[in-house]
Amino acid sequence: MEITVNNAVIELVQGDITKEETEAIVNAANSGLKGGGGVDGAIHRAAGPSIMEECRAIGYCPTGQAVVTGGGNLKAGHVIHTVGPVYSGGNRGEADLLKSAYLESLKKVTQNGLKSVSFPAISAGIYGYPLTEAAYIALKTIINYVKNHEGIELVRFVLFSQNIYDVFSDELKKIR
Ligand code: AR6
């Protein structure tokens, strides 16, 4: 499903983010930028070694922040590596940190003059963020950002399973 906010389309699809043709894709990375499992592992496998070299040179990304590399062998020319919070009960600032991970990623899109970006469900896998809350924060943050910033034309959520897609589309229907 999709909605339009200002000049931007916000779209939900089920699929594999490594195949995306948006100008940038977002990676759910760790602070050490060392690669790992989940979407991070998939992106590094598909992109090839050049983005790992760039990550090594950058060295570190605090939780809630984002850094940018090229896309290596991916169709997307840029990878925005952001670090979502590990969920540990909800009283350790997780919601603010997850919001910040989306916001800082969107700022990188704007700063690099890009018009399209794809996101996975940050923190909602290995980092254990409850899916419904993670979906609400993701969608609300992105809708508010595109309301106040011109330039981004497409924000696509690429959700890995039917279940994750269904949760995101229920939240989007409620917010809309
Ligand atoms: N395309 C789209 N979504 C995917 C893909 C893919 N190819 N593969 C997995 N997902 P996770 P996190 C979904 O665990 O929770 C790594 O080891 C997955 O189903 O990748 O932020 C990092 O190095 C889930 O919905 O990221 C960190 O150490 C979503 O992507 C840690 O995991 C996020 O799950 C980050 O954990």
Image (cartoon, rainbow, N blue to C red):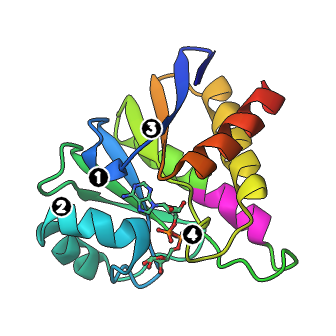
Relative depth, front residue between 163 and 56:
163
Give the residue type that dot 1 points to: Thr
Badge 4 element: loop
Give the residue type that dot 2 points to: Ala
Going from the N terminus, do you reach mark 2 or mark 3 first?
2
Residue 173 location, quadrant: top right
Q: Which residue is mark 3?
A: 110
Q: Nearer the viewer, mark 1 or mark 3?
A: 1
Asked whether 99 falls inside the magenta stretch, the response is: yes
Q: Which residue is depicted at the point 51% across and 44% down? A: 106
Density class for disc 3 (Cα within 10 Å; few <14, some 14-19, many ≥20) is: some
Queried on whether the Cβ of the residue with tag 1 lies below 8 angstroms from ligand 1, the answer reads: yes
Q: Nearer the viewer, mark 2 or mark 4?
A: 4
**Measured Cα–Cα span from mark 3 to mark 4:** 27 Å
- Point out the stretch of residues depicted in magenta: 94-101
Going from the N terminus, do you reach mark 2 or mark 1 first?
1
Queried on whether the Cβ of the residue with tag 4 lies below 8 angstroms from ligand 1, the answer reads: yes
Badge 3 element: helix
**Measured Cα–Cα span from mark 2 to mark 4:** 21 Å
Q: Quadrant of the N terminus?
A: top right
